[in-house]
Amino acid sequence: MLLYKIKSGVVVAHEERYYAIDGSWEKIINRNDLHAYLLNTMTGAKSLSGFGETPLAPIDQQEIWAAGVTYRRSKEARMEESKESGGANFYDKVYDAERPELFFKALPHRVAGPGEAVYIRRDSTWNVPEPELTLFINSQGNVQGYTIGNDMSSRSIEGENPLYLPQAKIYDRSAALGPALLVTETPIAPETMIRMEIRRNDKAVFSDGAPISRMKRSHAELAEYLFRESTFPHGCFLMTGTCVVPGNDFTLQPGDTVEIQIEGIGTLTNTVQYAKA
């Protein structure tokens, strides 16, 4: 089932029907057995013909974190961008290390929702979107749902020096989430595909896809490391890394449109702008 956050409340879509769910977004999602809770709640919920609104980013007070170098393709891209700085060896090592790379990505006010603009930095010459399956993990550390994430990345900044990672990754509208939270009774299927298309002047300038089965690490492993020594009273979102990376000769431009599709969740569409001065 799909859970949508909209201006007028919360809507769940299940078996081609829609239901209005009472309660705040945070109180609804931050629980164990979310799938069973929604099935039970739908029994007495108001049935809708649809909701006729553009969904909001499915986030309330949660932080967004991200995992890096979880796919071989990502490792290769990071090594390529940082070879001149001498940092390529870091990415090679972390791909095979026991401990994953985890980093803070965004607070809710910096997150773009469906149809909104994501930003690229003026001080970066190489900017790309990174399509990622994103986990919603409740406050007890249990994965309860999945959404689509766009981890915007300033590759020229990170490539100059790995210590510049926060500047390459954390700025206004450097993350997008949506359009819905997929809530399943069992973990998402490994063969689930992630696809991304970038359009410029109504023409596709990049298109590719890959299954999440190519991920080296498990979702449970990433969640366990994230919750070591850290508490998330509202739950949190964790971007799980990218397996679709544009070539080294590609950089985003203002006016581009990024469409990321994950089977079962939908399509997250955002336009590209420069970060506001």
Image (cartoon, rainbow, N blue to C red):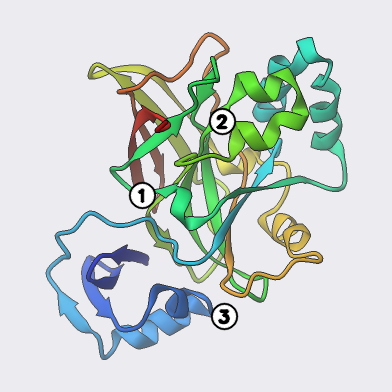
Which x, y percent locates residue 63?
57, 59
**Image point (77%, 31%), residue name:** 163
Q: Earlier in the sequence, mark 2 or mark 3?
A: 3
Between residues 20 and 120, which one lies in front from this camera angle?
120
Q: CA distance from mark 3 to mark 1?
A: 25 Å
**Image point (34%, 44%), residue name:** 267
Numbered disc 3: secondary structure = loop
Amino acid type, label 2: Ser
Q: Which quadrant holds residue 124? A: top right
Q: Which of the image's four quarters has the C terminus?
A: top left
Between residues 208 and 241, which one lies in front from this camera angle?
241
Q: Earlier in the sequence, mark 2 or mark 1?
A: 1
Q: Is residue 203 above or below residue 198?
A: above
Amino acid type, label 3: Asn
Front: mark 2 or 3: 2
Q: Which quadrant holds residue 137? A: bottom right
Residue at the disc numbered 3: 32
Tag 2 and tag 1, C-beta contact below 8 Å: no
Q: Is residue 111 above or below residue 124?
A: below
Q: Is 273 on the left or on the right of 163, as rendered?
A: left
Residue at the disc numbered 2: 153
Q: Earlier in the sequence, mark 3 or mark 1?
A: 3
Amino acid type, label 1: Gly
Q: CA distance from mark 2 to mark 3?
A: 33 Å
Q: Which quadrant holds residue 181? A: bottom left
**Image point (25%, 65%), residue name:** 7
Instruction: Please tell me the numbered disc located at residue 236.
Output: none
Which x, y percent locates residue 220?
70, 60
Numbered disc 2: secondary structure = strand
Q: Is residue 71 visible?
A: no
Residue at the disc numbered 1: 113
Q: Residues within 10 Å of mark 1 (few under 14, many from 20)?
A: many
